[in-house]
Image (cartoon, rainbow, N blue to C red):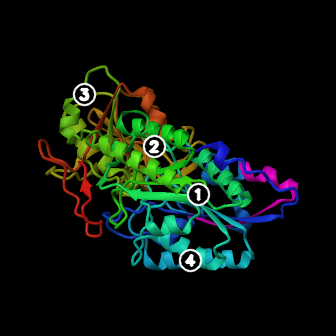
């Protein structure tokens, strides 16, 4: 959402010195409402992404459809000119989960700063962030890390950081980064392109005579994750407004929808407008206009949510339907073990229905112990007696993603099984991984076309792969009872005056 004339094509001096640019990544989306804590091991060997990398190991991100893959795609062709040197430093990424343990955060921060110190002088630092990382004792991990990096590298070093669409942007993040570059899509199908844009911003800033200016604001309301879908509806319309405003004012617009499952002072939507030096009034004008537009969409940004039995009752025979289990999505750090939708499908005897993917390692273990064709007995909440399920398929939970969201990414969710309970089938795994890719089904020998109804533990990301298959999509709150309002989420840290849409 930028003007290439103003932001990308700064003339290059004839005898420009070689610039040293570091590559760094620290990625975590923290659900502070989830019990437990996230330890260092979650970054070292995650189930659904690359393990922790240091130094030259980061070159393995070449050719991937990732943020860092996009950065390298733009920067590597510059290396033969002798005007640019890339210095791979460090990358740690963990799946969305509970609060990061203090020791893990301190260790990661220490490792990052040590890698930067050992790299020698840097003219620029490209950083891959999520933007919603929270640790015990630190509510703004990205802001704190940027402040530490700025103190280490000095004011002359250009810091450009990518953000997830769900980043909670703080004043420290805006202050210490020269440019923030968030995803523009949800589902996040533009991670690679975001990395490319960030690399171009870096090159432009390194060649620019002036640093530019910006304007920043946070919205006074929170948007549920399901309401942040950019494919159509209110959020889709607002993202088009951002494109139009960027062109009209010749500015760069960085919008984040926020991550409502992190209780911090900065939780919620935010907007940064970057403009050329001396154009502060233009940045402020564009910011005011867009914040007014966002406010105008407020009532349309809270989608309908159904209790499981209500959603099942709305299913239409012969219509391909998805029940999006938005309140128990492991992609937002939830446990992915709520069985309410499974029970509702079973009790209504919905044929050709499948629930995926439940994080139930003990069920998966039982299924592997007895084998395909045998039965296991399991306890369910609200059922007086154990229920019997038949084992239909077994697998190791290892698959390579083929959908647009995670294309090429390898997932290892541990021993996995497909079971049948009455009319409904279910996939259980040993680690919580969001069911957003066809591989989540194919690893047990089936595809979406084998079913009429899919219940997916996902809020929006599933739309990239499964959206075209579905004729109807219903958002389900598995923790809601029929007729009840949404359970209220109690914030302790959120800034005053912020409304929670539901």
Q: Which of the pair 416/54 is nearer the observer?
A: 54
In front of the other: label 2 or label 1?
A: 1
In front of the other: label 2 or label 4?
A: 4
The reply to whether discs 1 and 4 touch (Cβ–Cβ < 8 Å) is no
Q: Which residue is mark 3?
A: 315
In front of the other: label 1 or label 4?
A: 1
The reply to whether discs 3 and 1 touch (Cβ–Cβ < 8 Å) is no
Q: Which residue is mark 1?
A: 278
* Cα–Cα gap, marks 2 and 3: 25 Å
**In the rendered structure, does residue 418 fall within the stretch colored magenta?**
no
Tell me: residue 390, above or below residue 264.
Answer: above
Q: Which of the pair 385/90 is nearer the observer?
A: 90
Q: Which residue is mark 2?
A: 186
Q: What secondary structure is found at the residue carrying circle 2? A: loop
Quadrant where the N terminus sits is: top right
Q: Which residue is mark 4?
A: 148
Tell me: residue 135, above or below residue 418.
Answer: below
Q: Residues within 10 Å of mark 2 (few under 14, many from 20)?
A: many
Q: Residues within 10 Å of mark 1 (few under 14, many from 20)?
A: few
Pick whichever of labels 3 and 1 is earlier in the sequence.
Answer: 1
**In the rendered structure, does residue 89 fall within the stretch colored magenta?**
yes
Across and down, in percent, residue 16 comes to 84, 61
Q: Which residues are magenta?
A: 74-92
* Cα–Cα gap, marks 2 and 1: 33 Å
């Amino acid at each position: 959402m930028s003007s290439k004339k103003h932001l990308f094509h700064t003339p290059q001096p004839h005898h420009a010195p070689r610039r040293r640019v570091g590559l760094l990544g620290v990625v975590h989306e923290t659900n502070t409402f989830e019990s437990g804590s996230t330890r260092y091991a979650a970054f070292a060997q995650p189930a659904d992404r690359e393990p922790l990398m240091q130094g030259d190991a980061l070159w393995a991100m070449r050719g991937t459809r990732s943020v860092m893959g996009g950065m390298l795609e733009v920067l590597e062709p510059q290396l033969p000119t002798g005007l640019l040197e890339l210095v791979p430093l460090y990358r740690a990424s963990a799946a969305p989960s509970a609060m990061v343990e203090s020791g893990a955060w301190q260790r990661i921060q220490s490792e990052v700063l040590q890698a930067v110190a050992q790299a020698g002088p840097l003219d620029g630092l490209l950083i891959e962030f999520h933007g919603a990382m929270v640790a015990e004792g630190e509510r703004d991990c990205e802001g704190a890390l940027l402040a530490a990096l700025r103190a280490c590298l000095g004011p002359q070093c250009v810091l450009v950081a990518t953000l997830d669409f769900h980043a909670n942007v703080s004043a420290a993040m805006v202050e210490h980064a020269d440019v923030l570059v968030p995803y523009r899509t949800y589902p996040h199908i533009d991670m690679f392109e975001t990395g490319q844009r960030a690399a171009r911003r870096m090159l432009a800033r390194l060649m620019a005579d002036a640093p530019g200016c910006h304007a920043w604001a946070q919205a006074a309301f929170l948007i549920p994750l399901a309401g942040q879908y950019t494919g159509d509806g209110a959020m889709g319309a607002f993202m088009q407004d951002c494109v139009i405003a960027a062109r009209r004012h010749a500015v760069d617009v960085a919008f984040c929808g926020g991550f409502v499952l992190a209780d911090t002072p900065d939780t919620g939507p935010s907007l940064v407008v970057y403009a050329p030096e001396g154009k502060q009034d233009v940045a402020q004008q564009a910011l005011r206009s867009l914040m007014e537009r966002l406010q105008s969409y407020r009532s349309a940004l809270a989608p309908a949510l159904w209790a499981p039995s209500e959603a099942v009752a709305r299913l239409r025979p012969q219509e391909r339907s998805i029940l999006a289990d938005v309140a128990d999505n492991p992609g937002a750090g939830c446990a992915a073990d709520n069985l309410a939708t499974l029970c509702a499908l079973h009790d209504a005897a919905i044929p050709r229905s499948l629930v995926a993917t439940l994080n139930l390692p003990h069920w998966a273990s039982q299924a592997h112990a007895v084998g395909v064709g045998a039965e296991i007995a399991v306890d369910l909440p609200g059922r007086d007696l154990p229920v019997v399920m038949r084992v239909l398929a077994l697998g190791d939970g290892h698959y390579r993603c083929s959908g647009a969201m995670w294309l090429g990414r390898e997932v290892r969710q541990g021993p996995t099984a497909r079971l049948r309970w009455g009319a409904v089938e279910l996939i259980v795994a040993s680690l919580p991984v969001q069911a957003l890719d066809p591989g989540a089904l194919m690893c047990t020998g089936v595809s979406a076309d084998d079913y009429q109804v899919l219940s997916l533990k996902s809020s929006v990301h599933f739309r990239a792969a499964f959206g075209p298959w579905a004729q109807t999509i219903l958002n389900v709150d598995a923790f809601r009872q029929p007729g009840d309002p949404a359970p209220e989420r109690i914030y302790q840290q959120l800034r005053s005056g912020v409304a929670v849409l539901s």
